[in-house]
Image (tube, grey):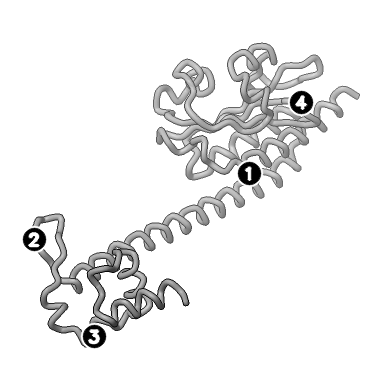
């Protein structure tokens, strides 16, 4: 015989004083209509409230259901917000890929990538820094830095070779976003990679201090890094020939 049935029999036999709280709860779950014929019992029941006043069982039930409804709506809103963000990021990624395919040189690749990525709603600032190399030929408008300097400043990105989100120092923020000043509070650093080599660093900035955080899914950002890296590598190879 199951524990639930045993608890039910003991309640029916009037031995409630020997039951544990868990057994009573189990019995009531198995018999949700128990109180329908127990008006006198309901009249004697009262529950403590945060205000210090006693409330009825029905009032307590309504409060719990309302609280659960609020939680469910919040979870639904979060899912919808994530879905909207993913849709926007997909559109940004698609437009970026199409624009990169039309780029004619390394300068245009850098400018197109920065312009396209800066248009995303949740990106308040975007900077692209190309790693200097012997066959690199770009205009003065494109930011370039030595691999040694970038590795020294952003070691984790070069070591892990994937997008890094989270807190960075104020000096690093100023280094990445010289025109944004102190408005950038959180960052995502995305390496543009091809065959394991970091060809450029794509920096995303947001004014919220927790938008780019360590729990953020970086699937799209990593994909963008690989796309930009592949296009850059092809252009560098064509230039070298």
Query: Label 1, label 4: how many angstroms apart (C-alpha)?
Result: 19 Å
Return the disc, 3 or 2, that comes first in the chain's sequence: 3
Q: Please report contact status of discs 1 and 2: CB closer than 8 Å, yes or no.
A: no
Mark number displayed over residue 53: 2
Placement of 181 over or under 71, stated as above or below: above
Residue 101 in percent (x, y) is at 75, 42
| 129 w.r.t. 39: above or below | above
Residue position for label 1:
219
Rendering coords of residue 19 (x, y %): 29, 68
* Mark before the other along the chain sequence, 4 or 2: 2
Q: Name the one closer to the observer, 166 or 220.
A: 166
Q: Position of residue 12 (x, y in %)?
A: 29, 82
Precedes in sequence: disc 1 or disc 4: 4
In the foreground, 73 or 21: 21
Q: Say which residue label 4 marks.
A: 197
Above or below — where is 92 with respect to 228?
below
Q: Between marks 4 and 2, how big is the CA–CA gap? A: 67 Å
- First in sequence, mark 3 or 4: give its number: 3
- Say which quarter of the image contains residue 226: top right
Q: Which mark is residue 36?
A: 3
Q: Secondary structure at mark 1?
A: helix
């Amino acid at each position: 015989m199951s524990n639930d049935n045993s608890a039910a029999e003991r309640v029916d036999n009037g031995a409630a004083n020997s039951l544990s709280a868990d057994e009573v709860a189990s019995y009531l779950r198995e018999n949700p209509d128990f109180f329908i014929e127990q008006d006198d019992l309901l009249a004697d029941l009262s529950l403590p409230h945060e205000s210090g006043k006693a409330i009825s069982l029905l009032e307590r039930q309504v409060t719990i259901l309302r609280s659960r409804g609020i939680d469910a709506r919040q979870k639904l809103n979060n899912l919808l917000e994530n879905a909207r963000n993913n849709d926007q990021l997909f559109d940004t990624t698609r437009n970026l890929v199409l624009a990169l395919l039309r780029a004619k040189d390394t300068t245009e690749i850098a400018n197109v990538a920065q312009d396209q990525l800066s248009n995303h709603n949740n990106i308040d600032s975007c900077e692209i820094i190309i790693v200097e190399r012997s066959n690199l030929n770009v205009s003065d408008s494109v930011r370039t830095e030595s691999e040694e300097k970038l590795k020294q400043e952003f070691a984790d990105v070069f070591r892990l070779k994937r997008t890094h989100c989270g807190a960075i120092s104020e000096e690093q923020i100023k280094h990445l976003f010289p025109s944004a000043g102190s408005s950038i509070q959180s960052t995502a650093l995305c390496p543009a990679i091809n065959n394991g080599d970091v060809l450029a660093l794509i920096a995303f900035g947001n004014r919220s201090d927790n938008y780019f955080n360590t729990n953020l899914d970086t699937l799209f950002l990593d994909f963008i890094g690989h796309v930009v890296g592949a296009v850059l590598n092809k252009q560098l190879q064509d230039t070298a020939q």
